[in-house]
Amino acid sequence: METRGRAREASRLRDMLSALKDRVVTLEDFIGDVKERLDEVDGGLTDGLQSMKEQLRDYVWEFLSSIENKLTGRDDTPEAMMTALKEEIVELKSELTIYMAVVGNRGLVVAPKPNVDVPKPKEFNGTRPVKDVDNFLWGME
């Protein structure tokens, strides 16, 4: 009797072990699929960030060329040129801060729409005074 009980127990344990192995294989396949999807997403983000980086570099070069053209066209004193450069630098820093925030957040933040109170019209009961109709047709008197 004990031999049969042990054999059943061993058979049951083998079945459980086999089921567990099947689950592990399924889990490994699932994890492999997830890793592939993450690699695809990461590649897309990298490409997008690279594109943004190139656009930012082009913008900075265009901006610097614009500053150079403005400065060569002027015949101002060095102090005026320094003031103009400082203003341009402040603008560049603020724009760079915006770009860095966008790149850091990986996208733009959308602000909620403001609530606007619109007055409700009075309920129409089927009649209007003659004065209101005349004012509507002929303008305010």
Image (spheres, grey):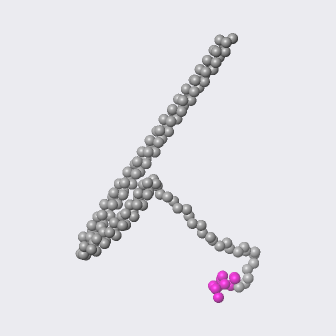
Q: Nearer the viewer, residue 89 or 30?
A: 89
Which residue is found at the position 65% from the left and 11% from the top? 3
- Name the image quarter holding residue 104: bottom left
Residue 126 covered by magenta stretch? no
| Magenta span of residues | 132-141
Quarter of the picture containing the C terminus is: bottom right
- Name the image quarter holding residue 39: top left
Q: Residue 60 appears at what percent x and percent y?
A: 33, 61
Q: Is residue 41 left or right of residue 19?
A: left
Q: Nearer the viewer, residue 10 or 37?
A: 10
Quarter of the picture containing the N terminus is: top right
Note whether residue 79 is visible.
yes
Q: Is residue 136 left or right of residue 92?
A: right
Q: Residue 55 appears at what percent x and percent y?
A: 36, 56
Q: Is residue 51 left or right of residue 23?
A: left
Note whether residue 74 is visible.
no
Q: Residue 43 appears at what percent x and percent y?
A: 42, 45
Q: Is residue 81 above or below residue 10?
A: below
Q: Is residue 7 above or below residue 102?
A: above
Q: Is residue 56 above or below residue 135?
A: above
